[in-house]
Image: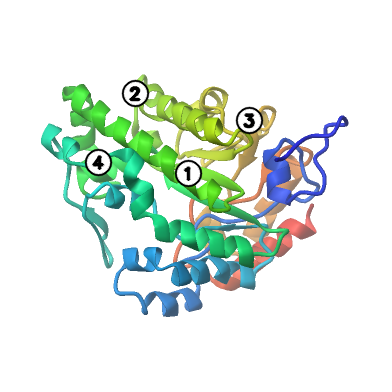
């Protein structure tokens, strides 16, 4: 779908898609992780109308409205579908609840019986039909110059929630299962790999211009497990998606991968690598020699705003000029963020390019 003319420049396509196809933009395209969320008063009002967070995600009209709220406020180059990475375990038959001030809570899968009781990975798309309905509505409603991004959690990150029962709390249980029962853990990862691939393919077929894999807990893995549980499954998912859609554009985010971002970019086949705020500008420039690079403004700097934020924006835009750069954060927008700081960010990026 996106082809390069003989001079190597990609023209007449959406700015984000141009960068993903290999063409630097004079002004880097801008979108933000969690750009639809609790920092927006209109989002908070909408969220109160849903009986649960998953009900919110599975009601196409609500998901569409939430997706479009930041697009209506800010001059962003992409909309990312409002959904959640944990729709996958929900679709596999694992109950997921979202508890206020706690986050997602799941009944842990810790043995062969739990893994074998999950539904087949190729069946998740039936359960997730409302997600694809939302994408089709968005495809019709979005300005043609704005890209539409679909996404999924990567297998390792989803597995951490499923085994631990919640996220970001030591990872002792999931690591022990991975090392003590590799056959059981391997079956779980296989099920997730299949489910994620089917979910991404379905999102592309519903109208997503590109898709993103969030591996939020990739950085907690030591070697060689990072290669086995992050790189290898991502490579296979990329291959599955491209077998169905050869021109598919894919962004990978192995958060806190440190010095392993380069090998991730080289071995997974993604078109862009999103990096967290710990990554240096020099490393981003090095990555941008082979793939597009996305990130990595600190979300707390967006909360602070003002000259410190704008100085960092100037540094990033100037330092990555001429490279395949997508302006974004190193993680998601946090609830404390003043909406006017997001507007200032967008203005600063566009004013300093």
Q: CA distance from mark 4 to mark 1?
A: 29 Å
**SS type, badge 3:** helix
Mark nearer the N terminus (4 vs 1): 4
Mark 2, mark 4: which one is toward the viewer? 2
Whether residue 155 can be seen here:
no
The image shows residue 117 at horizontal and vertical percentages of 16, 40
Check disc 1 and report the residue beneath it: 200
Mark nearer the N terminus (4 vs 3): 4
User: Which quadrant would the N terminus be assigned to in this image?
Assistant: top right
The reply to whether discs 2 and 4 touch (Cβ–Cβ < 8 Å) is no
Q: CA distance from mark 3 to mark 1?
A: 24 Å
Tell me the tag on residue 225: 2
Check disc 4 and report the residue beneath it: 170
- Residue located 60% across and 64% down the image: 305
Tell me the tag on residue 287: 3
The image shows residue 87 at horizontal and vertical percentages of 34, 53
Mark nearer the N terminus (1 vs 2): 1
- Residue located 64% across and 64% down the image: 142
Identify which residue, 125 or 20, lies in the foreground.
125
Mark nearer the N terminus (3 vs 1): 1
The image shows residue 345 at horizontal and vertical percentages of 66, 62
Relative to 262, say whether 33 is above or below: below
Q: CA distance from mark 2 to mark 4?
A: 16 Å
Whether residue 350 can be seen here:
yes
Q: CA distance from mark 2 to mark 3?
A: 22 Å
């Amino acid at each position: 779908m996106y082809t390069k003319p003989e001079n190597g420049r990609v023209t007449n396509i959406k700015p984000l898609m141009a960068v993903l196809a290999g063409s630097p933009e004079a002004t880097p395209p801008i979108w933000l992780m969690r750009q639809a969320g609790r920092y927006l008063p209109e989002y908070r009002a909408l969220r109160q109308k849903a009986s649960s967070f998953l009900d919110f995600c599975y009601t196409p009209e609500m998901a569409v409205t939430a997706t479009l709220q930041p697009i209506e406020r800010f001059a962003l180059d992409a909309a990312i579908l409002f959904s959640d990475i944990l729709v996958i375990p929900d679709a596999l038959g694992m109950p997921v609840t979202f508890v206020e001030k706690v986050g997602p809570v799941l009944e842990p899968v810790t043995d062969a019986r739990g893994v074998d009781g999950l539904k087949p990975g190729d069946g998740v798309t039936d359960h997730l039909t409302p997600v694809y309905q939302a994408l089709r509505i968005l495809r019709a409603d979005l300005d043609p110059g704005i890209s539409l991004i679909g996404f999924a959690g990567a297998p390792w990150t989803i597995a951490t929630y499923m085994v631990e029962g919640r996220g970001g709390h030591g990872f002792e249980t999931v690591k022990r299962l991975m090392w003590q029962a590799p056959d059981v853990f391997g079956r779980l990862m296989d099920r997730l790999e299949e489910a994620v691939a089917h979910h991404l393919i379905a999102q592309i077929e519903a109208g997503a211009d590109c898709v993103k894999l969030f591996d939020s807990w990739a950085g907690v893995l030591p070697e060689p497990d990072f290669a086995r549980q992050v790189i290898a499954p991502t490579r296979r998912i990329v291959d599955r998606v491209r077998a169905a859609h050869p021109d598919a554009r894919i962004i990978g985010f192995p958060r806190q991968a440190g010095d392993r971002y380069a090998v991730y970019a080289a071995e997974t086949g993604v078109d862009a690598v999103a990096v967290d705020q710990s990554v240096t500008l020099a490393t981003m420039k090095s990555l941008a020699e082979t793939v597009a690079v996305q990130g990595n403004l600190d979300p707390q700097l967006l909360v602070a705003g003002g000259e410190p934020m704008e100085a960092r924006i100037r540094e990033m835009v100037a330092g990555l000029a001429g490279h395949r750069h997508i302006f974004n954060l190193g993680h998601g927008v946090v609830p404390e963020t003043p909406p006017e700081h997001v507007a200032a960010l967008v203005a600063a990026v566009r004013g300093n390019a």
